[in-house]
Image (tube, helix red, strand yellow):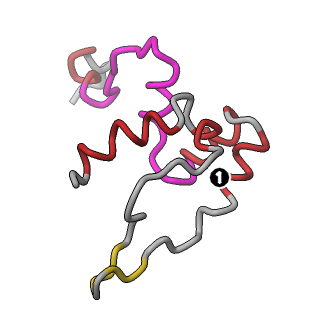
């Protein structure tokens, strides 16, 4: 058997070329594989006060009992203040998504 260099067609499956992503945000999020990766991105991109405020409550259990059933997420959405600190649309974003997720 004679040794030879591999052909490009033989190398292509091993290289796994991807189309370049021009959107930097989409590229960073696609490369984030764990929650810790997302946390690291957020810490770099978010103002310190906003990140510390949000990250400080990350381990809090928001579940509670409602009419005898355990609910793992907050039960309702209400104006709470500081919402705009997490999202530029603030309370408007919560009001917009609330009825789609849990119609009353």
State the quadrant of the N terminus. top left
Viewer-nearest residue: 39 or 70: 70
**Residue appearing at x 59%, y 69% in the figure:** 59
Magenta residue check for 42 = no
Q: Is residue 46 above or below residue 3?
A: below
Compared across the picture, whether 53 is left or right of 34 comes to right
**Residue appearing at x 45%, y 47% in the figure:** 33
Q: Which residue is mark 1?
A: 54
Viewer-nearest residue: 4 or 83: 83
**Residue appearing at x 51%, y 74% in the figure:** 61
State the quadrant of the C terminus. bottom left
Where is residue 34 shown, x and y percent of the image?
48, 52
Where is residue 99 shown, x and y percent of the image?
26, 45
Compared across the picture, whether 83 is left or right of 56 comes to left
Element class at badge 1: helix
Compared across the picture, whether 41 is left or right of 97 comes to right
Where is residue 30, by image quadrant?
Answer: top left
Q: Range of the magenta residues?
A: 13-37
Magenta residue check for 17 = yes
Viewer-nearest residue: 61 or 19: 61
Where is residue 52 shown, x and y percent of the image?
74, 51
């Amino acid at each position: 058997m004679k040794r030879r260099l591999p052909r490009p067609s033989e190398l292509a499956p091993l290289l796994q070329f991807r189309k370049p992503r021009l959107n930097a945000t989409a590229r960073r999020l696609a490369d984030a594989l764990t929650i810790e990766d997302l946390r690291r991105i957020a810490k770099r991109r978010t103002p310190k006060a906003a990140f510390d405020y949000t990250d400080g409550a990350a381990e809090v259990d928001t579940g509670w009992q409602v009419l005898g059933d355990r609910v793992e997420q907050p039960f309702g959405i209400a104006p709470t203040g500081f919402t705009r600190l997490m999202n530029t649309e603030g309370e408007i974003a919560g009001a917009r998504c609330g009825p789609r997720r849990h119609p009353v």
